[in-house]
Amino acid sequence: MNAHFHSQRGAVTLVGALFIIITLALMVQVLNRTAGSDMLDSAVQSDSVEAFFIAESGLEYAAAAYNTGTCDSSLANGTPINVGRGSFTVENIGAEFTSDFSGALLPATDCRIRVTGSIPTLAVQRVVEAVFSKDDNLLGTANADFDEPEMLCSTCSPTGWNLPADGWEDDAGPDGTGDRAARVEKPTNGPTAATIAGAFGLTPFTVTAPVTLTLEYDYKASGTGPGKSDKAYYTFHVWDGANLYSSAEMGTPYTSGWTSGSTTIPITGSGPVTITEFRFLIEAKAGQVTTAWLDNLDLRGPGGGTGVALLQWRERVTD
């Protein structure tokens, strides 16, 4: 009996060893699967971010095409356009593209566009949609002519404009009765100076920098006499929420009547810039004119062409 017992003692150790080996093998397998899953998840996330940026690039492409064309099948590329490791496709034709995201029917100046960005490696896609509006004047709803029904009210301002009450004058613009104009005035053309500034929060529009915007405007200055060197000074700005882009100060000479002026506003940097505000400053400097007026602002995109404003944006999530 003792000899038989001693011959069986190693079996227990062997079983224990086999159990440990099998357990370790299973743990290694689980760890390998987990690591592989994490690597796959990271790759999918990376591709998803890249696909999103490609879709955004596609929106810029479509906006540029709409800027110089019309909202028709010419905007929808028949084959994918390659960008980086992926590509994008553009859609804008069909019943769902005739309304905005709330279901309201789009006017003729607006265009709804869908872009799908794709990375083929892991079949990742991101879809974004936007509603663009095209208007000859990038100031949009700013009432750039300052016109409203005649109120004969020196304290009334065109809707949405931030300007002191004494900065407006009724029946003062070049467009006839009821036309309002922005104005700065000082008592004499001697040593005193006066300035006034106005601002309007725009419906945001996006341009791709570097680009130059062109502003046309009507002005009038008086207070001395014809032939004098006296001038009124105008400066114009657009704001993107972080950066202020400005025209050079425009010294416009004395004029007995309304005259048209023009200046440029360079948008520096690179990539998309979304403009959210327009500002102007009128100055009657010491020794210069006593009164200066401003009216009929017209801001245009490159080459004086039309501009495209981004009205709505969203990412489309599908199952």
Image (cartoon, rainbow, N blue to C red):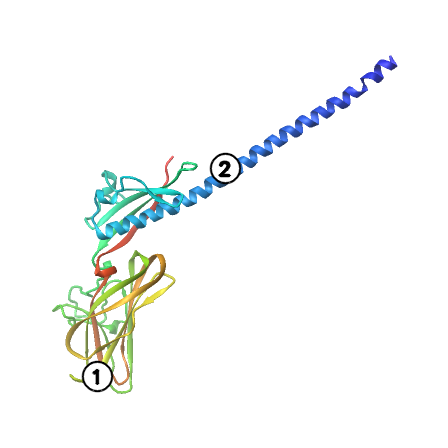
Q: Quadrant of residue 32?
A: top right
Determine the CA span between mark 1 and mark 2. 73 Å
* Residue 301 visible to the viewer: no
For this rendering, which residue is in front, 275 or 56? Answer: 56
Q: Tag 2 or tag 1, which sits nearer the N-term? A: 2
Mark 1 burial class by Cα count in 10 Å: few <14, some 14-19, many 20+: few
- Element carrying mark 2: helix
Q: Residue 203: percent from the left, percent from the top?
A: 28, 57
Instruction: Mark 1 and mark 2 in contact? Answer it, CB < 8 Å.
Output: no
Residue 242, above or below 12: below
Mark 2 burial class by Cα count in 10 Å: few <14, some 14-19, many 20+: few
Which residue is at 21% across, 83% downward? 229
Q: Quadrant of residue 118?
A: top left
- Name the residue carrying label 2: 40
For this rendering, which residue is in front, 151 or 200? Answer: 200
Residue 262, above or below 139: below
Q: Residue 87: percent from the left, percent from the top?
A: 35, 42
Which residue is at 17% across, 67% downward? 151
* Residue 64 visible to the viewer: yes
Q: Residue furthest left?
A: 176
Q: Residue 124: percent from the left, percent from the top?
A: 41, 38
- Name the residue carrying label 1: 229
Q: Residue 53: percent from the left, percent from the top?
A: 39, 47
